[in-house]
Amino acid sequence: MTMKHLVSINELSPKDILRILDRAELFEQDPNRDLLRGRVVATLFFEPSTRTRLSFETAVNRLGGRIIGFSDAATSSSSKGETLKDTISMVGGYADLIIMRHYLEGAARYASEVSRVPIVNAGDGANQHPSQTLLDLYSIRKTQGTLYDRTIVLVGDLKYGRTVHSLLVGMSHFRPRFIFVAPDELRMPQEYLDFCRNHGIPYEETRAFDREVIDRADILYMTRVQRERFVDLEEYERVKNIYELTNDMLSTSRDNLRVLHPLPRVGEIAQDVDDNPKAYFIQQARNGLYTRQSIICEVLGLEVH
Ligand code: CP
């Protein structure tokens, strides 16, 4: 049997996605299941994280497994110049599964090629964040009752935001319509526009973030401008506060609209949105626990009943 990794959302069929979401529902009903007894999971985070690392580690703990790893690469031997290949080879000798976030695009793919244990991509540069996408899909299905025929408005940093790239691909199986809201500097990259065209997915691009756009949305997906990806920090300063969602902007939105954000937020969603029943980003992050439990079972081939 070939080893299963989760490197890119592109590798999952709609059937795979739905199986992972269905299993996550079982974990939402009961997250405490002793499925990882005797197993060790490594979390290697070469970039900062709150939600992804802690929800994966909570997932392992609630499944009865044990955790090793680092949350700061400066404390690992990569700071002495150890190659990623050597780090992955070493850790694969200690753990049954490696969950890795890395600042380089393609690092997860490379790790999967040299690893003796499954690799889960917890984000690689501006490329992909597949476990985030699966929890986003879980959140969309849970709030909308379906994944099909939704209008998704993606707002903010569509150039560097790996979550929107993965979400676009993940939703492509379910007849979405997209509206991309971004300044010129942060437009959705051409390869994803081409992907939409090649898959017959309707999309629009606009710079204007206003009620006219919000009122057409089923899902309003806000994103942070990714300071850490800018080469030119003056450009970051120009665009960092470009959009802010405030509560009054939601007043004429659809009843089923939900506001999602992968978090952390740094000003894209005003605090006065938090108490609006359409704000779903805190529950969305919580859904990450159930979805990541399901992902761990998927790559390790564990049955859940
Ligand atoms: N959404 C997300 O990846 O959050 P963290 O960077 O806190 O893990």
Image (tube, grey):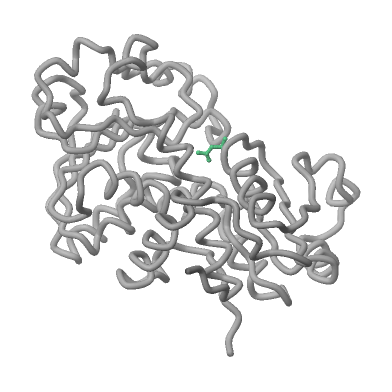
Task: Choose top left, top right, bottom left or bottom right for residue 185.
Answer: top left
Residue 22 in the image: x percent, y percent?
37, 62
The answer to whether 205 is drawn above or below residue 259 in the figure is below
Residue 201 in the image: x percent, y percent?
15, 57
Total marks drawn? 0
User: Looking at the image, which residue is at 45% across and 46% down?
Assistant: 162
- Residue 232 versus residue 38: which sits nearer the camera? 38
- Residue 232 versus residue 110: which sits nearer the camera? 110
Task: Choose top left, top right, bottom left or bottom right for residue 72.
Answer: top right
Residue 95 in the image: x percent, y percent?
79, 66
User: Looking at the image, which residue is at 38% across and 20% down?
Assistant: 268
- Residue 191 versus residue 49: which sits nearer the camera? 49
Residue 41 located left or right of residue 240 = right
Residue 9 located left or right of residue 153 = right
Q: Quadrant of the N terminus?
A: bottom right
User: Looking at the image, which residue is at 34% across and 44% down?
Assistant: 139
Residue 21 located left or right of residue 5 = left
Q: Is residue 251 visible?
A: yes
Residue 112 in the image: x percent, y percent?
63, 71
Q: Is residue 129 visible?
A: no
The answer to whether 253 is drawn above or below residue 85 in the figure is above
Residue extending farthest bottom:
1
Q: Quadrant of ligand 1?
A: top right
The answer to whether 142 is drawn above or below residue 185 in the figure is below
